Amino acid sequence: MVSQGSAWYVDFFRSDYLNVYGHMFTEDRAEKESAFVERTLGMKPGSSVLDLCCGQGRHSVQLAKRGFKVTGLDLNAEYLDLASKAAEAAKVKIETVAGDMREIPFENKFDAIVNMYSSFGYLESEAEDLKVLESAVKALKAGGQLLLDMLNREWAIDNYIQNDWHTGADGTLYVERRDLDLATSRMHVHFIVVDSEGGRRESIGHIIRLYTLTEMTRLLERVGMRVTAVFGGFEGEDYGIVTRRMIIVAKNSS
């Protein structure tokens, strides 16, 4: 497991992540996305689900409301505390586990694993990303399913805007700069944060490897999984160049 401060995904996923993106994480959105997961995977109540990189538990809670036995795994213990409190407030039960996505501490346990909101591709190399898939296969039951909700690389290139900004509810200004390296297929998003009194600081931001469908299909095949469906969004849209999301469903063929 990584040590504190050793990687961007340790530092950014403290307060900056929720401050920058929190306005997008509505309950309605989580409910819609979780309904899609239930419908797409065809799971019955009582099925065991791992929410991999669960964050503050917005999908974990919604999936638990639908009758699934949910485990949320995240590297950030503070997020897991938020997830537990959200489950308690919603009067549902979830299990939370602090851990690295490369080292899922279960074997042959889950009917499904879901990985939401572009949290695959954060690691330092393709070899490290492959470890995540290897760990997921180990944690799945035979015939279990994996759902990966990813940013569509083709869309990201076609809609590339280098500079953007938005203002938070408290008046904080977030100035965003995106640097896309086509040679490595990595997007580095930096932030300058300006508070309502004019104080300025830089955020470490985040880096993500943007995979093509071809690349993901090959990686999944390497770990013994077979792609069964690909969607372009949570309405069940067909995947294509113009769709913002690339939602891959794969089955454990072992």
Image (tube, rainbow, N blue to C red):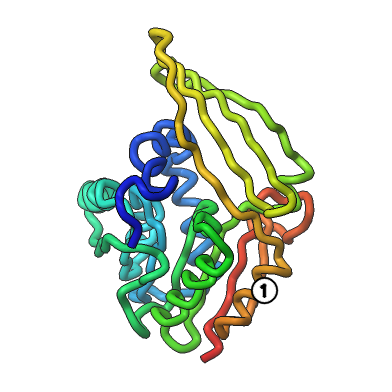
In this rendered view, identify the residue nearer to me: 10 or 233. 10
Does 70 sit above or below residue 226?
above
Image coordinates for residue 194, horizontal then vertical, percent: 45, 17
Q: Nearer the viewer, residue 19 or 132?
A: 132
Q: Residue at x 66, y 60 (%)?
A: 211
Give the position of the N terminus as an image quadrant.
bottom left
> Please, which residue is most extreme toward the bottom here?
254
* Residue 250 on image: x %, y %: 58, 75
Q: Residue at x 73, y 69 (%)?
A: 214
Q: Residue at x 68, y 48 (%)?
A: 244
Q: Position of residue 80 (x, y in %)?
A: 27, 52
The reply to whether residue 90 is visible in this rendering is no
| Mark 1 neighbour class, 10 Å CA radius: few under 14, some 14 to 19, many 20 or more | some
Identified at 63% across, 81% down, the residue is 221
148 up-or-down from 82: above or below: below
Q: Quadrant of residue 231?
A: bottom right
Q: Amino acid at mark 1?
A: Thr
- What percent of the width, then of the height, locates residue 164? 63, 26
- SS category of the residue bearing label 1: helix
Q: Which residue is mark 1?
A: 217
Q: Is residue 208 above or below residue 228?
A: above
The reply to whether residue 162 is in sight is: yes
Give residue 19's quadrant in the image.
top left
